[in-house]
Image (spheres, grey):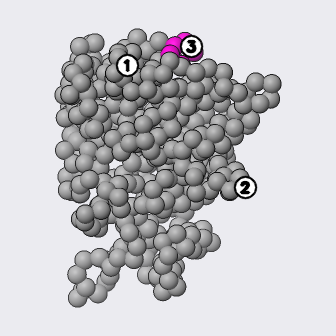
Amino acid sequence: MSILSEYHPLRKVVVHQPGHEWNLVTVEHNMQEKYLIEDVLFTEDAAADHAEFTACIKHAVGDDSVIEFADLLSDILDDREIRSDIVGAISALEGVGIKTHDLMLSDEFSQKELAELMIAGAYKPDDKDHQGYRVLFPPIPNLLFTRDIGIFYNDAVILSHPAKTVRRREGLLARYIFRNHPLFKGIEIVDIFDDATSHGLKESVHLEGGDMIALDHETLLVGCSERTSAIAIELLTKRLLTEKITKRVIRVNLPSDRATMHLDTVFTIIGEDDCVFYPRFFSEEEGSERCPCFTYEMVNGRVKLVHESAPNSIFASLERLGYGFSNRIPCGGNIPHYQTREQWTDGANLFAVLPRVAFIYERNIQTIKAFKDIGYTIMSPKEFVQTDVEFLDKTLITMSGAELSRGRGGARCMTMPFDRKQ
């Protein structure tokens, strides 16, 4: 298994369909701070839209291409020693007592039920007099966005270290899956937490998958953002270059802002010459915000800064490497008002299942129009599953985002590919 780009034909991807964890989110004044969400999903509709999305992926690349995160977790819980380790780690992370710890280790739950409990933080007792769920610890609704738990790149998986407390259980569960599931046997695991701890930097090292984009097998883009810290990028760059996992790392400085929480909310690649970008950050026009890019490579055995881009364009760094991206599609089209609106609803967060065949929310009308203007065919999911994908090119599939987009993540956010054809 290997990932060398963002757009080669997909083989395998990890997803998580929204479930009971969303029903257990409490509506309160600090919901955004506590859960990182502005609204609650209508879970049934969100799950149906997510199922339609994954059905399209299966149509494009095969029924066995989509792997559910909860199933991977359930699989490894078959091993009693691993199960005990995970329960102990969750108990420590969530600060629960012995009673809850022992309950999770008991035979009351099947593997699947325990996996669901670990995600939702609650379970339904057999007691018929007990209405609803018995809550043990908070749910992790953001697991819907599996992209952020790490990134597969070349022949390695880079583990995330979430910046926000509500997402740390996701990272913990992912670590156990990648270390213990037979599907990932032999994969190299890149974890910068040991480096952070040895340098006394553990509390300031934050790294999330949405900030990492594979340009090619030699170049990884990493956003320095609200969710990924500069020191984390420094440690990651040193690790990747010294171990020759990649030839270069390009750091993209972004405003530390909720609206632009990750690099992939303002820039994604869907083909060799095709990308989507947020003009407010990466345009050459006067008034663009400054988002300088820094390219690092190994020179004479040491990590060195070898290039700094123009202050307001990622494209200067990419052109230097031979990537002109002749089809640069502006999120929101050419109208600043819609650029801001559609960036908020993930108009720049696209996922390519095949070269130049990608998914976007149907609500991003101006972005879709910009694609149509350069010759893309626009299809609904129902139309897409009736096509012969062998002959598809320059195709945009417009997903319903009425509920899914409330969670603040698009098609790329909802996918963690771990194998693409080269």
Mark 3 vs mark 1, foreground winner is 1
Give the labeled residue for mark 2: 198
User: What residue is drawn where x is 47% and y is 40%?
Assistant: 225
Few, some or many residues within 10 Å of mark 1 (<14, 14–19, 20+) = some
Would you say residue 287 is visible in this rendering? yes
Question: Residue 208, relative to residue 62: is it above or below?
Answer: below
Q: Locate residue 240: give its quadrant.
A: top right
Between the C-alphas of marks 3 and 1, the distance is 17 Å
Depth check: 327 or 28 in front?
Answer: 28
Q: Give the label on residue 81, or none.
A: none
Give the labeled residue for mark 3: 320
Few, some or many residues within 10 Å of mark 2 (<14, 14–19, 20+) = few
Depth check: 355 or 173 in front?
Answer: 173
> Which of the two labelled residues, at mark 3 and mark 2, occupies the earlier sequence position?
2
Q: Give the label on residue 283, or none.
A: 1
Farthest residue toward the front?
287
Which region shows up in magenta?
316-323
- The amino acid at mark 3 is Arg
Badge 2 element: helix
Q: Locate residue 326: give its quadrant.
A: top left
Rendered location of residue 41, percent (x, y): 23, 55
Would you say residue 62 is visible in this rendering? no
- The amino acid at mark 1 is Ser
Depth check: 420 or 316 in front?
Answer: 316
Few, some or many residues within 10 Å of mark 3 (<14, 14–19, 20+) = few
Rendered location of residue 411, percent (x, y): 34, 38
Rendered location of residue 146, percent (x, y): 43, 48
Depth check: 159 or 315 in front?
Answer: 315
Question: Residue 14, relative to residue 23: is it above or below?
Answer: above
Badge 3 element: loop
Between the C-alphas of marks 1 and 2, the distance is 40 Å
- The amino acid at mark 2 is Ser
